[in-house]
Amino acid sequence: MTSIRRHLLMGLLGALTVSGLVAAAGVYLQARDEVNALFDYQLQQIALALRDHTTTALVVASTAQSNAEQEVVIQIWDAAGLHLYHSHPGLPFLPQTTAGLTTVATPYGTWRVFSLRGVGYDHVIQVAQPMYVRQAMAAGMATRTLLPWLATMPLLGGMIWWLVGRGLQPLIDVAQAVSQRHPQALEPLPTTGLPQEVQPLITSLNGLLQRLAAALAAQRAFIADAAHALRTPLTAVHLQTQIVARTSEEEARQQAIAALQQGVQRSTHLVQQLLTLARLDPEAAHPPLMPMALNPLLHAVIAEHAPLAAEKALDLGLARDDPACLAGDADNLRILFGNLIENAIRYTPVGGIVDVRITSTPDAIHVEVADTGPGIPPEDRARVFDRFYRRGGTGVPGNGLGLAIVHTIATRHHAQMTLGERDSGSGLVVRLTFPRA
């Protein structure tokens, strides 16, 4: 399992280590430059001192002996090039160099050399020092400079561990608060006193809890409504089966069986509507809306309901059929228009008219289903979209779910739905306005 505290600790310590290495390199380079400048000056001073005492061999010898401990090699030549003196006989001879400071690479290492010669001066004095002496001294200076920082690394790691843990404590508190809640506790988590970085997480959690509470409330309401709606038809079916079982006369038995079949059919239709409504729940997963042609779908829905309209001698057809394309779910739209046309057929008297119109405009697509039935009074038009709402006095059996399903599908397709009256008399006009694909 990934640990934020461990990740931050390793990252911060790694960054500090890299910074320390860069600082060490900078300290080393600066120390090397200072050591080079100091030793270059020393070489010059030794050569100048020897120039002033070259006629006194004792002075030369003592000077050489004092510099032997500093690993400085002294060589002296006369004007003819004869090698007069070498302070370290065990070391190889270094070749003569040009006057001044130079760096010489030899098979025995790199040397820093100062050569002194001049007009009116018949000797060549050359003072040399191996470069490793300078590098070792620079490295020692850099190490001594960084030792305090290295010694504080464990203390720094402990402080980072403690500070990161303290900074993550609000997250731990939130996790404990969530883990201690029971499944029914969906109240929002408190946001006061939380760090700014934690508040977006709590806000998102509270939004999730709010949506979950709404979904559970809708589910409970749906279960309660479904139980209430199923109780009556199932009770009727149960009574009808008892009537069939007790009836001995064939004619009465056939009537009871017919009533039983109607009751089963109504119960089946109700269950199908309930399942459709549950499938259309906004919290459920839905396929994406895809561009599609609306006309073939409406033609198929009208053809499916033509036999039902023929039973009542209704004039069912397309009064206008403009070409129309929209972004939609074909299965859901089939249910939507099927419910609208079925409702129009059921509520329209024998010999009436049910017209479907598809009107295409530059901005939207309008679909109308108009019938010559009793219509819906204006005061009831807002309530007919509620689940299980039934207007009294219609004399038409139903369960109050058809328009609720239509409204749910229309909302998912971003369509506006309005109810109105026919211009030429009584009846209902259901108008759906879809945005163009």
Image: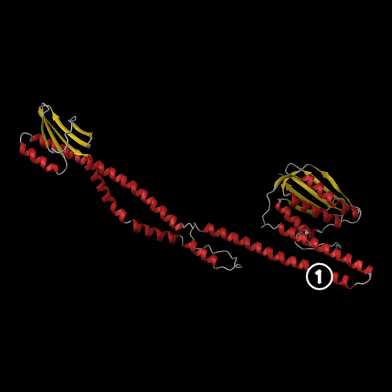
Q: Quadrant of residue 157?
A: bottom left
Q: Is residue 383 visible?
A: no
Image location of residue 264, percent across then percent down: 83, 64
Q: Residue at x 72, y 67 (%)?
A: 224
Image location of residue 150, percent across then percent down: 31, 54
Q: Secondary structure at mark 1?
A: helix
Q: Is residue 227 visible?
A: yes
Q: Residue at x 88, y 66 (%)?
A: 257
Disc 1 designates what residue?
235
Q: Is residue 159 above or below residue 325?
A: below
Image location of residue 424, percent across then percent down: 87, 50
Image location of residue 40, percent across then percent down: 19, 38
Q: Quadrant of residue 292?
A: top right
Q: Quadrant of residue 230?
A: bottom right
Q: Amino acid at mark 1?
A: Thr
Q: Residue at x 6, y 39 (%)?
A: 59
Q: Is residue 435 left or right of residue 101?
A: right
Q: Between residues 245 and 112, which one lies in front from this camera angle?
A: 245
Q: Between residues 226 and 209, which one lies in front from this camera angle?
A: 226
